[in-house]
Amino acid sequence: MKIAVYGKGGIGKSTTSCNISIALARRGKRVLQIGCDPKHDSTFTLTGFLIPTIIDTLQLKDYHYEDVWPEDVIYKGYGGVDCVEAGGPPAGAGCGGYVVGETVKLLKELNAFYEYDIISFDVLGDVVCGGFAAPLNYADYCIIITDNGFDALFAANRIAASVREKARTHPLRLAGLVGNRTSKRDLIDKYVEACPMPVLEVLPLIEDIRVSRVKGKTLFEMVESQPSLNYVCDFYLNIADQILSQPEGIVPKEVPDRELFSLLSDFYLNPISNKNREEKEYKENLLDFTII
């Protein structure tokens, strides 16, 4: 199974991806996480350092694939998760999609691409072009990381549009949304009402999740010295279990940009009318229940 994890930049994709990878490994699966960001920091909390990238290694070998060995590019991370960083072109030059293609090509040359139960692509930012969408060419499922905010959900909608487009020619489905670091989910629910899709999990606003990134550790590793955080790991294990159940997934139908803009902005600009609407719906549902 191959998974592509997307979401707005800075939303916590890499932190979430690393913890999901360990959760999958805890379920007995062989897992490879591929960082698809020129910053090459996707697997930092798994390895504790910035590992050399595929592109760096190929440049050292003068792009002679036959001179590259698995140990040159695949690094063992915490919990038995194997890690690869694709890297990328210099800032402002080249195409990240090309780098993803080269990474998959090399892993196939090394007979490593098909040795894992799960391969997770951790992809930078929003989908703004075909290059950013390249990992979707190889994925069975896409998972979108969001929070309960306007910008993250606007980005999620664009990613949903990319999944729909890729699903025309690839066996790709959207597994669902993961809400990250959010104390509420009302705006997420509003979006999902307009663009139906599964919500796999909503992680609460926990400072230790953010701090784990700074420490270069996953929550699973932090639990070893802070057992009180064990309940946080359960969120990631729940996501892993849903993935391993091989959900049917969906081909989403995104909300048109202007319509979504109005929907989300109205939620902020007219909180009283929204509250009144929710109370009215609650009373109507209560009345229906009473009649039954």
Image: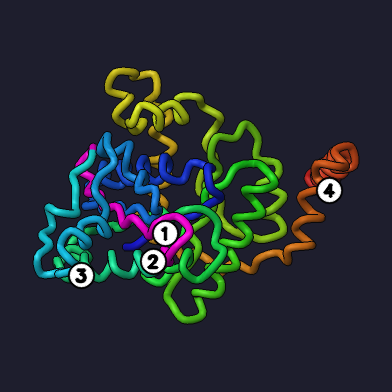
Viewer-nearest of labels 2 and 3?
3
Distance CA(mark 4)–CA(mark 3):
49 Å
Q: Secondary structure at mark 2?
A: loop
Mark 1 or 4 closer to N-term?
1
Asked whether residue 290 is in view, the answer is no
Colouring scheme, one of rainbow, by chain, secondary structure, one colour = rainbow
What amino acid does circle 4 point to? Asp
Mark 2 or 4 closer to N-term?
2
Pointer 2 local density, CA inside 10 Å: few below 14, some 14–19, many at least 20: many
Residue 24 lies, in percent from the top left, at: 30, 47
Residue at screen point 47% across, 66% down: 133
Q: Which residue is mark 4?
A: 266
Quick check: marks 3 and 1 in contact, CB under 8 Å?
A: no
Q: Answer with the quarter of the image where residue 62 lies.
A: bottom left
Front position in the image: 181 or 235: 181
Mark 2 or 1 closer to N-term?
1
Q: Answer with the quarter of the image where residue 115 lies.
A: bottom left
Q: Which residue is mark 3?
A: 108
Magenta residues, as a range? 78-97
Q: Which residue is mark 2?
A: 139
Q: Is residue 179 magenta?
A: no
Quick check: marks 4 and 3 in contact, CB under 8 Å?
A: no
Residue 176: image tag: none
Viewer-nearest of labels 3 and 1?
3
What amino acid does circle 1 point to? Ala
Q: Answer left or right for 251 relative to 43.
A: right
